Structure formats: C-alpha cells, structure tokens
Image (tube, rainbow, N blue to C red):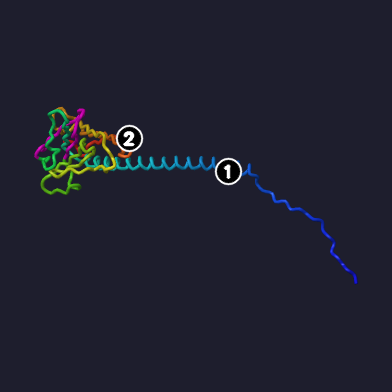
C-alpha cells in the first residue's frame, strides 16, 4: 500500500489593517469642528427665519390696518381732524369719547391738520362714509373715526356713538400715528381749490423686540369735492 500524503502548503500570515489611535483622534477632531460649524450655521438660519417671519407678520398687520383706513377714507367726505394733548387745553376731546355722538359733537364740520402737536394723547380724523356700502345706514349718515390712542398704544376705529375698537393686533405697539389733512373744506368755499388729502404716518414696534417699523401713505378723496 502506498501512503499518499497531501503536500504541505506554505503558511501565510494574514494582516488586518485599521486606524491607529492617532488617526482616530484626528478624525474625531475634524468631525467635531465640521459639526460645530454646521450647527452654528443652522442656528443662524433659524434665528434669521424667525426674525423675517416676525417682520412679515408686523408688516402684514400694519398693511391690513392701513388698507382698511385708506379704503374708507378715500370714499369719505367732510373730513374733521383734531388732537387732544396730554397736558394742555384745546382740541375736541368729546368726539373721541365712547358714547359721545360724533354727529352731535362735529356735525357737518370740517377741519384740517397741517401739523400734529407733540405729546398728543388722542389724534385722528373723522369723516362721513361716501355711500352706504360699509355702515348700511338708511336714514342718518354716521361718521367714521380713526384715531391714535397713546394710552393704549394702538389705533382705534369708532363709528358714530359706538365704542371705539382697536384695529391693530395686541402683539404690535403703535409708537406714533399721525393724520395730516388738507383741503377739508368743500371747493364751494371761497378760496378753496384743493381736493381733500389725508396723509397717514405710522411708527410701530413689535412687542417682542425693539425694532421699529414705519409706514406712510397719502389718500386723496375720490368723490368730487363740491
């Protein structure tokens, strides 16, 4: 019998390659730097997005209020502008007061405001609605009043003798609102050849920060001033 044996293969040593401790430390360090920079950029983007959304909310609120005022003022007539200062006499404070009829206090009167006194607490413009599409009155026309209330830092709307209601959301602080009126007298009045014009200037601040926003618009009476 033959004893057959398999030939012996040469022994090979298998080496497993990997990272050394120093390579691991360097890799982790680079990874930490990249992640820190990425998180920092993400936080900046989030903060910028929140700020932009806040600004957009403020401007949308102001634009809506301004559009509501200009739409009614444009079609109105018999504009009466007045202020009531905090520490001085003068001015018709009665028509700002809830329960007091503007029609009784002002009647068909007109009055310009070419300048606004400093330290005014109440300031606004009153007018009759041109047509009956808004108030829907059938017999007696009612005046609409838009005014700045410094005590509550907002802009309010008052119809006739009804209570005034704010038209600005609670998250917005109105620092100042001024109404400038020119040419309020009818053109039939001697020496008045100017169509009534109302300029509105609003300075507001978001209640959550100190950034201020300013808006201004000029409205010309749409109906013929006769």
- Pick the quarter of the image with the C terminus: top left
Residue 167: x percent and y percent?
24, 43
Res 49 seen here: yes
Residue 41: x percent and y percent?
48, 40
Near-viewer residue (215 or 51) = 51
Secondary-structure class at tag 1: helix
Residue 63 falls left or right of residue 15: left
Residue lying at the far right of the rendered structure: 1
Residue 71 falls left or right of residue 100: right
**Between disc 1 and disc 2, whose residue precedes?**
1
Residue pointed to by mark 1: 28
Q: Residue at x 78, y 54 (%)?
A: 12
Residue 82 lies, with reference to residue 100, above or below; the image says: above
Residue 181: x percent and y percent?
20, 32
Magenta stretch encompasses residue 178: no
Label 1 with label 2: CB-CB less than 8 Å? no
| Numbered range of the magenta stretch | 104-127
Binning the other alpha carbons within 10 Å of mark 1 as few (below 14), some (14 to 19) or many (20 upward) gives: few
Residue pointed to by mark 2: 210
């Amino acid at each position: 019998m033959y004893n057959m044996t398999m030939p012996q293969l040469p022994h090979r040593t298998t080496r497993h390659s990997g990272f050394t401790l120093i390579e691991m430390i360097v890799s982790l360090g680079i990874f930490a730097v990249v992640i820190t920079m990425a998180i920092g950029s993400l936080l900046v983007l989030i903060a910028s997005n929140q700020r932009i959304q806040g600004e957009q909310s403020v401007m949308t609120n102001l634009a809506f209020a301004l559009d509501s005022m200009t739409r009614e003022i444009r079609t109105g007539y018999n504009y009466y502008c007045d202020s009531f200062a905090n520490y001085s006499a003068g001015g018709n404070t009665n028509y700002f007061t809830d329960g007091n009829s503007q029609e009784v206090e002002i009647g068909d009167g007109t009055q310009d405001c070419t300048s606004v006194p400093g330290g005014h607490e109440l300031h606004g413009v009153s007018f009759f609605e041109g047509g009956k599409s808004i108030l829907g009155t059938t017999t007696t026309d009612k005046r609409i009043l838009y005014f700045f209330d410094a005590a509550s830092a907002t802009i309010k709307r008052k119809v006739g003798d009804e209570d005034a209601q704010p038209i600005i959301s609670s998250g917005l602080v109105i620092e100042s609102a001024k109404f400038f009126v020119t040419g309020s007298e009818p053109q039939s009045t001697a020496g008045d050849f100017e169509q009534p014009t109302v300029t509105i200037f609003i300075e507001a601040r978001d209640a959550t920060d100190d950034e201020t926003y300013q808006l201004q618009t000029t409205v010309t009476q749409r109906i013929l001033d006769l």
